[in-house]
């Protein structure tokens, strides 16, 4: 029983340090994201473009969709799916291409690893940022 406590104790002391260092990486992402207002504007406009092109444009060809014995306009039928697809696209773009760009072209992680921040800190900070950006994308799409 004593050996279990001894092995758990040092592992638990590492997590507060990881949290602080990961928070700094998260803060860096917030500052960078704040300065690129065009990304926010595109996140707001994307569902509207989808609805305008597919919902209204293609909706004139389809008309209404039979659902449970009734009829629903195609725009009302397809709008929730288009908003969900827009939220998913924004979240995937923020979490995959963003990391790829930081590794391949910006070399951000090379610079970060030259500091006391480690790979675990980077992973926690980036996952926290991706979750936050995805939830804000979902909120923007539901407007």
Image (cartoon, rainbow, N blue to C red):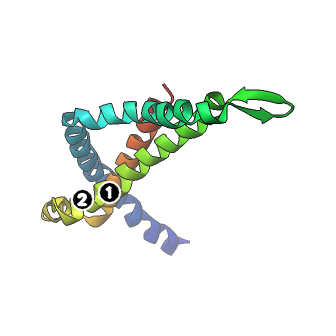
40 left or right of 5 in image: left
Give the Cα distance between marks 2 and 1: 6 Å
The percent coordinates of residue 62 (x first, y second) are 65, 36
Farthest-out residue, top: 143
Q: Residue 101: which numbered mark, if any?
A: 2
Q: Residue at x 32, y 57 (%)?
A: 97
Farthest-out residue, bottom: 3
Q: Residue at x 47, y 37 (%)?
A: 50
Q: Residue at x 24, y 59 (%)?
A: 101
Return the residue nearer the eye: 87 or 32. 87
Verify CB contact (< 8 Å) between mark 2 and mark 1: yes
80 left or right of 142 in image: right
Which secondary structure, mark 1? helix
Check the image and report above or below for 60 versus 110.
above
Q: Residue at x 37, y 36 (%)?
A: 43
109 left or right of 119 in image: left
The percent coordinates of residue 111 (x first, y second) are 13, 61
Q: Residues within 10 Å of mark 1 (few under 14, many from 20)?
A: few
Farthest-out residue, front: 61
Q: Residues within 10 Å of mark 2 (few under 14, many from 20)?
A: few
Viewer can see residue 121: no
Check the image and report above or below for 58 versus 13.
above
The percent coordinates of residue 79 (x first, y second) are 58, 33
The percent coordinates of residue 82 (x first, y second) are 54, 39
Q: Residue 97: which numbered mark, if any?
A: 1
């Amino acid at each position: 029983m004593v050996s279990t406590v001894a092995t758990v104790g040092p592992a638990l002391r590492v997590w507060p340090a990881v949290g602080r260092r990961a928070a700094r990486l998260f803060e860096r992402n917030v500052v960078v994201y704040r300065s690129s207002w065009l990304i926010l504007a595109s996140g707001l406009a994307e569902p509207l473009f989808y609805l305008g092109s597919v919902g209204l444009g293609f909706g004139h060809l389809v008309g209404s969709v039979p659902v449970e014995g009734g009829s629903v306009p195609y725009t009302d039928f397809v709008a929730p799916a288009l908003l969900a697809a827009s939220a998913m696209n924004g979240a995937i773009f923020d979490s995959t291409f963003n990391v790829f760009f930081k590794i391949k072209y910006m070399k951000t992680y090379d610079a970060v690893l030259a500091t006391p921040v480690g790979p675990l800190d980077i992973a926690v900070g980036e996952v926290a940022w991706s979750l936050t950006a995805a939830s804000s994308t979902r909120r923007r799409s539901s407007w």
